[in-house]
Image: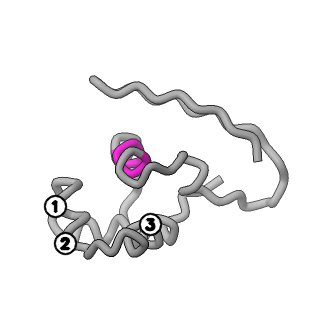
Amino acid sequence: MKFDYRKLREARLKRELTLEDMANRMGMDVSAYWRLETGNTKLKAEQLIAFMDFFQKPYSYFFKVDDGSARTVKLIVESYQISYKHSITF
């Protein structure tokens, strides 16, 4: 399962936000956010949580399954003040 950077762009465009809007929300410069959205920079867990929260999407929205088989994924992320638990089967 890999992060689908196209889904990040899709979510941004659905909210009619510019690259600059998202960069500001993420506390990044525009070029750094663009590299993230195009897959030229690896996504950090804290960023994933921020995207899930901002776009009100489950983490499964941002991932694609490479082999097409059904699998169960459990994600537990704890970061300072953030704790997110979610389990999904697809």
68 and 50: which is toward the camera: 50
Three-letter code, disc 2 = Glu
Question: Spatial distance from mark 3 to mark 1, Cα to Cα?
Answer: 16 Å
Residue tagged 1: 24
Structure colour scheme? one colour
Q: Position of residue 54 (x, y in %)?
A: 35, 50
Identify which residue is drawn at 84% across, 53% down: 69
Label pair 3/2, CB-CB below 8 angstroms:
no
Dot 1 falls on a residue whose secondary structure is helix
Residue tagged 2: 20
The mark that comes first in sequence, 3 or 2, is 3
26 and 53: which is toward the camera: 53
18 and 27: which is toward the camera: 18
Identify which residue is drawn at 41% across, 54% down: 55
Question: Spatial distance from mark 1 to mark 2, Cα to Cα?
Answer: 6 Å
Q: Position of residue 82 (x, y in %)?
A: 34, 28
Dot 2 falls on a residue whose secondary structure is helix
Mark 3 burial class by Cα count in 10 Å: few <14, some 14-19, many 20+: some
Magenta residues (range): 47-52
Q: Which mark is residue 42?
A: none
Residue tagged 3: 11
Three-letter code, disc 1 = Asn
Rendered view: 72 above or below 62: above
Q: Position of residue 78 (x, y in %)?
A: 40, 25
The mark that comes first in sequence, 3 or 1, is 3
Q: Nearest to the eye among marks 3 and 1: give it.
A: 3
Rendered view: 67 above or below 10: above
